[in-house]
Image (tube, rainbow, N blue to C red):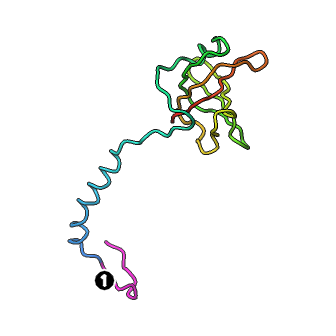
Amino acid sequence: MFATIHARSGFPDRLSSGSVIRWLPLVFVAALFTGCLERKPKILGSAFDGKSVAVATAKQSDPGSRLIVHGTMIEKCPEAGCWFVLRDESGVIKVDTKDAGFVVVDVPLQVSLTVAGQVDTNGAGRILKATGLRY
């Protein structure tokens, strides 16, 4: 039933079912508490607070407007992590992090995140120049 441990290891050849049963509740409780721990969000750049708006609203906002947008990172700069594309149910927007003092190299794709920033123009469209990011 239990695996045999090599004789030179100093352990008995077989684990007794009593010793396994004795440790089983402790392992179960430890696993339960580990799964219940609340994950603290990671913050890059400046901390921020407030209500988020939809990507479509951000894309229609005037340049210079400061706002918060929530969505999923679907693409990012493959070399330096200096920009990423954020998607929500209303659309997509490019987010620039060059001037924010952080990069998203270590932030995984498809992660849900919230970004604060200032609306700017990029050719014919709008981008968001990030000041802070939380995921």
Residue 8 point in image, percent of width and height: 40, 88
Location of the N terminus (image quadrant) = bottom left
Residue at 30% in and 50% down:
32
On whether residue 111 falls in the magenta region, the answer is no
Residue that lies at the very extreme toward the right in this rendered image: 123
Relative to 74, is 49 on the left or the right? left
The residue positioned 39% from the left and 84% from the top of the image is: 9
What crowding class fits label 1: few (fewer than 14 Cα within 10 Å), some (14-19), or many (20 or more)? few
Left or right: residue 57 compared with residue 5: right
Task: Reply above or below: 10 against 135.
Answer: below
For residue 88, which quarter of the picture? top right
Q: Which residue is mark 1?
A: 12
Residue 47's x, y, as percent? 50, 32
> Between residues 1 and 99, which one lies in front from this camera angle?
99
Viewed as shown, does residue 25 lie left or right of 93? left
Indicate the quadrant where residue 124 lies.
top right
Percent across and percent down for residue 51 are 47, 19
Looking at the picture, tell me which residue is in the foreground, 135 or 10: 135
Q: Is residue 7 magenta?
A: yes
Residues shaded magenta: 1-14
Q: How many marks?
A: 1
